[in-house]
Amino acid sequence: MSSAPLRSPALRPHRMKKDESFLGKLGGTLARKKKAKEVSDLQEEGKNAINLPMCPAPVEVHPEDSLLEENEERTVIDPTSRDDPRFKELVKALIDWINGVLVEERIIVKQLEEDLYDGQVLQKLLEKLADCKLNVAEVTQSEIGQKQKLQTVLEAVQELLRPHSRPLQWTVDSIHGKNLVAILHLLVALAMHFRAPIHLPEHVSVQVVVVRKREGLLHSSHVTEELTTTTEMMMGRFERDAFDTLFDHAPDKLSVVKKFADGVYLVLLMGLLEDYFVPLHNFYLTPDSFDQKVHNVSFAFELMLDGGLKKPKARPEDVVNLDLKSTLRVLYNLFTKYKHLE
């Protein structure tokens, strides 16, 4: 009589292993869902902290803006400010300027915070503007290496701007953290210091939401950041001279100087003073762009040289940018030479 076949004892442990694997996967899935929920809750907390009743419009918060370490802070530009035409004009002017300076490097900047945060473009920009070579690694992928490069670049910038004794409105962490407000402050300062041949809109301000994490909770505050003032103030010219006295005592009379900003009056004035007709095809009688105005003022400066005047210290871009001191100095040179004419 044959006996029934015995069950293999090896089957049960195999099933236990399968069960354990299933439970492990289930536990991992639950853990991931829990972590995802924590991230979602923290993001929601960040949005609630920012979108307070005092804020006129909700501010879009990116995940990295709400996941903060203790005592860490992030800034978010209010969407209304981002959509302001003057803010957009400022950003575009700076991007075009950078791309123009670095055209030989074949570097194209499209978004300031994404393209400048690692220090690579800022390094090339400063080396080109200051005609210097910084002792930094050419390419760095690590966060530590990028911050070290930024530190070197920003120290060089500070050395250049030190005579103006103005507080710096950027740091290594803010630039590397893609803080657009800090990046704009830095670029405006560089543009003014190196007298960039561009027109920066005056009196550009943005509403900024500052988010800080304290004791595990996110707190927000709203501040106004002034990115540009007047061209004269941003140039950092604080020396006192006779023109400052004129500014102090007759500021209402200076609006007439703005009429020379497009170069038309300067060209026609040189023709009158030297007693000749200036062919209209040599300049733009009704300039409608910055470049056309610069062309006119440059042409007027050439006529001044032909008339025996010294080369103006001011640049054509200064006059077009409504730099009153530069314009007045040009006019004063004309006055001293031709004052004998009746």
Image (cartoon, rainbow, N blue to C red):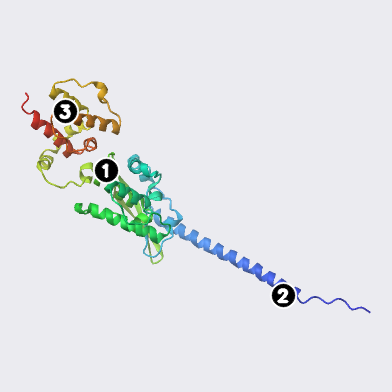
Q: In the picture provided, is 31 more to the left or to the right than 264?
A: right
| Mark 3, secondary structure of its residue | helix
C-alpha gap between disc 3 and disc 2 = 102 Å
Quadrant of residue 312 in the image?
A: top left
Which label sits in the foreground, 3 or 1? 3
Measured as percent of width and height from the top left, residue 95 is found at 35, 43
| Mark 1, secondary structure of its residue | loop
Label located before the other in sequence (1 or 2): 2
In the displayed structure, 187 sits above or below 214; it is above
- For the residue pair 328 and 55, the one nearer the viewer reads as 328
Dot 2 corresponds to which residue? 13
Q: Amino acid at mark 1?
A: His
Measured as percent of width and height from the top left, residue 84 is found at 35, 41
Q: Is residue 57 visible?
A: yes
Q: In the picture provided, is 276 more to the left or to the right than 11?
A: left
Q: Residue furthest right?
A: 1
In the displayed structure, 287 sits above or below 226; it is above
Quadrant of residue 262 in the image?
A: top left
Q: Residues within 10 Å of mark 2 (few under 14, many from 20)?
A: few
Measured as percent of width and height from the top left, residue 145 is found at 39, 60
Dot 1 corresponds to which residue? 203
Q: Is residue 171 visible?
A: no
C-alpha gap between disc 1 and disc 2 = 76 Å
Q: Amino acid at mark 2?
A: Pro
Label located before the other in sequence (3 or 1): 1
Q: In the picture provided, is 74 more to the left or to the right than 13?
A: left
Dot 3 corresponds to which residue? 306
Q: Amino acid at mark 3?
A: Asp
Q: Residues within 10 Å of mark 3 (few under 14, many from 20)?
A: few
